[in-house]
Amino acid sequence: MSRPNVLLVVMDTTRHANTLADGTFESLPALARLASEGTVFDGAVTTAPWTLPAHAAMFSGQYTTDHGTHGGTQYFDPDRAPLARRVRDAGYRTAAVSNNTWVTPEFGFADGFDDFYTRSEPFPSGDDPAAAREAVRTDPLGALRDAVADGTAASTAGNLLYDRFLRDRGDDGARLSNWRIGRWLDAHDGDEPFFLFANYIEPHLPYTPPAEFLPPGFDSGVAERVAQDPWAFLMGETDIGERGFETLEALYEAELRYLDARLGDLFDRLRADGTFDETAIVVVGDHGENVGDHGLMDHQFSLHDTLLRVPLVVKPPAGTGPTVGSVSAPVETRDVFPTLLELAGADAPTHPTVSDRSLLESVCGRADAHREHAVSEYLHPRPSPETLRERFPDSDVDVDRYDRSLRCIRTPRWKYVQATDGREQLYDVAADPDETANLADDRPRVRDRLRRTLRAERGRFDRPAEPADDGTDRHEPPAGTERRLDALGYI
């Protein structure tokens, strides 16, 4: 395990139920092959249910309340000496390829990377094509004026031309990401091991998979008509219905199959040039997705297992000896941080808020690195109730019920969820995996025990204060970034 290459792959918005429900990647052959050479962590739980705080946890080893990056403070502070900087200081060449706008230099994630490639279009400075088309549709003159003022007119036009004539239909950037990774690897001289981080956004809304990955007999006409606006659904502006959600589920699973194929291309590329065996690979979902589950779409406003349980695979470099095939006990995605640092031989922080539970303990059978429980937090609702009311002024839906912070503790049997508005939930997830029956009043001893454990481990639970106005705008993304986030459903 001396200085292997290290590859971290994040499958954005990928939930356990559609990947590892039976304990294997039955419908995802590339991941199944990778898992056969490493360890599957079937009990993996993300520390946060959406992209920004979930990635900050993997880059810092901390919970959201500790790294402080969430919907209210939208910036990952590089002063935390994040993952890439530590790995680079250990003698690695580092690169990142990210298709999620949240995981970019604009939000603090570039620190420690020698090269950082963003976006699913060739011109990162330009607008996302979907956002550009929507801007032109609603206000063509204003869109042109803004593009000229921002200096993005030419790059946006280039992205639109690429999207219209060159981009593979249904591809959200995976193919372009693989091309960028291939070029970067070709330019890598091999004198230094590499650390490569790649975020693939395919399973994220909107679901638009290539036709060849849809199930046989799939009605594409229904797919074109079904609404994919999660906030219009939440506010009662669209009625998707049972058939509509069945369609969305089929589209979501097709996105996963397409992403698996592109990951297979990436792994085959490493095999072809002889670097696969000497590369440690970690593949993880940053969070899951609600596809009509619990009356919700997207991945906000709840801490249900549809958002928290994610796939996690660790494939060590060849020569490390036999590996444990599967671990069912709880682990947290923030444990990815010490795992990668150990693989790279990098210095690890000793701060008590940082995870020191390397998953390699379990992978290599040295010790049992699992946890008795996992903790997740959701500190700031996004979009805010005010934003939803502004976007849907005629809706009579009470969105103030989402104006709260959440945290939970999950054991193999029980899940306790606490909200800052005083509401509590308790689920027997072993007997009720869909979390349909709230037992908070029926099992008070279990509820109180888990509440005490959560309090002892994480302290008081209060709504985080609004960020102070310090005269800077580093937490406010520029207009072009806001438009790209809006195209992904982040309003």
Image: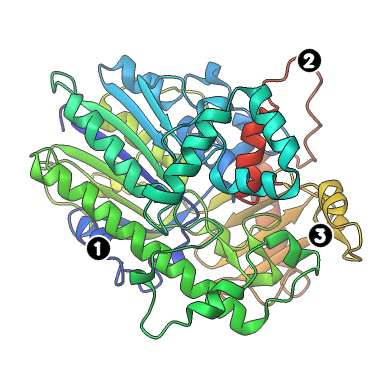
What label does residue 470 carry, if any? 2
Lower sequence index among marks 1 and 3: 1
What label does residue 404 carry, if any? none
Q: Secondary structure at mark 2?
A: loop
**Residue type at numbered disc 2:** Asp
For label 1, count other residues whose C-alpha is less than 10 Å away and answer few (under 14), some (14-19) or many (20+): some
The percent position of residue 72, horizontal first and vertical second, equals: 73, 35
What label does residue 423 carry, if any? 3
Distance in Å between CA atoms under marks 2 and 3? 33 Å
Lower sequence index among marks 2 and 3: 3
**Residue type at numbered disc 1:** Ala
Nearer to us of marks 1 and 3 is 1
Labelled pair 1, 3 in contact (Cβ < 8 Å): no
What label does residue 32 carry, if any? 1
For label 3, count other residues whose C-alpha is less than 10 Å away and answer few (under 14), some (14-19) or many (20+): few
Q: Can I make out residue 17 in this image?
A: no
Q: Is residue 363 left or right of residue 78?
A: left
**Residue type at numbered disc 3:** Arg
